[in-house]
Image: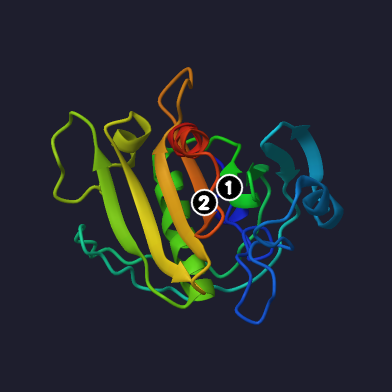
Amino acid sequence: MKILTAILLTLLIFSACSKEDKTDVRKTTWGMSKTQVKEVETAELIKEGNDILTYRIGGTAVPMKVESTEITDTEIEENEKTTPPEVMGISYEYDLLYVFGENGLGMVVIHLRDSFDEPEQYLELFKERTNILTKQIGEPAKGVASYKDHQVKTNPYENPAAICAGEHGLQHIWPTKDKRTNVSLELDQKKYAPKPDCNISIFYESIEIPVNQKLADELHEVL
């Protein structure tokens, strides 16, 4: 089994920039062209399409402490609190997608590429990532559970294997950041996997610069 503390994410990789920054996500600003994004993004460019630039990011372990932040739920009663790790690091790879609309950059997605051995590892990472984003944004998350044809659970956090099997998904969303960006963290089934597996993705979406809605829906569905 892979050690959880070796796969938790750092502020550097998944940074939604602080209020003092003039950028929106990493070193980019909403409305940038593909050329402008390529000039400031230093990660490895894997694929370039008409509407998407795909980069590969990852790195070596970086020690840091993270304070635990309680999740505020309006639709889910979440009583379980996570214990903050003493050391966080990264040893896996992630896809970084810049998505463009008619008026330039309008969405950034950071998607975990690797698979974990146990469904519980996804849920723990999901909660740890929630704590980090809450600290960055300065507002607590709201929890949303999405169901298909399965029975609604009293506590959708209690069985991560059911998430990987596609019975339901989890989404944590934050209030609009600086009136510019919607931020959401999603844990759901990995589509087209040979066996039940999970996805974890962070979506940063511009309020004023939309991308193609069909493309946005497909990314939320697949990633």
User: Which residue corresponds to the image point at 81% horizontal and 43% vertical from the top-left?
Assistant: 44
Q: Is residue 126 left or right of residue 111?
A: left
Q: Position of residue 200 (x, y in %)?
A: 49, 44
Residue 166, quarter of picture: top left
Question: Would residue 83 be seen by someone viewing this image from the given angle?
Answer: no
Residue 165, quarter of picture: top left
User: Could you tell me if the residues under marks 2 and 1 are in contact, i.e. CB atoms within 8 Å?
Assistant: yes
Q: Position of residue 168 (x, y in %)?
A: 28, 37
Question: Residue lying furthest bottom in this view?
Answer: 20
Camera-side residue of 175 and 123: 175
Residue at label 2?
203
User: Which residue corresponds to the image point at 58% horizontal and 74% vertical from the top-left?
Assistant: 65
Question: Residue lying furthest top in this view?
Answer: 194
Q: N-terminal of the two: label 2 or label 1?
A: 1
Mark 2 surroundings within 10 Å by alpha-carbon count, few (fewer than 14), some (14 through 19), many (20 or more): many
Q: Position of residue 112 (x, y in %)?
A: 58, 42
Could you say which disc has been placed on residue 109 in the image?
1
Q: Secondary structure at mark 2?
A: strand
Mark 1 surroundings within 10 Å by alpha-carbon count, few (fewer than 14), some (14 through 19), many (20 or more): many
Amino acid residing under circle 1: Val
User: Which residue corresponds to the image point at 45% horizontal and 45% vertical from the top-left?
Assistant: 122
Q: Secondary structure at mark 1?
A: strand
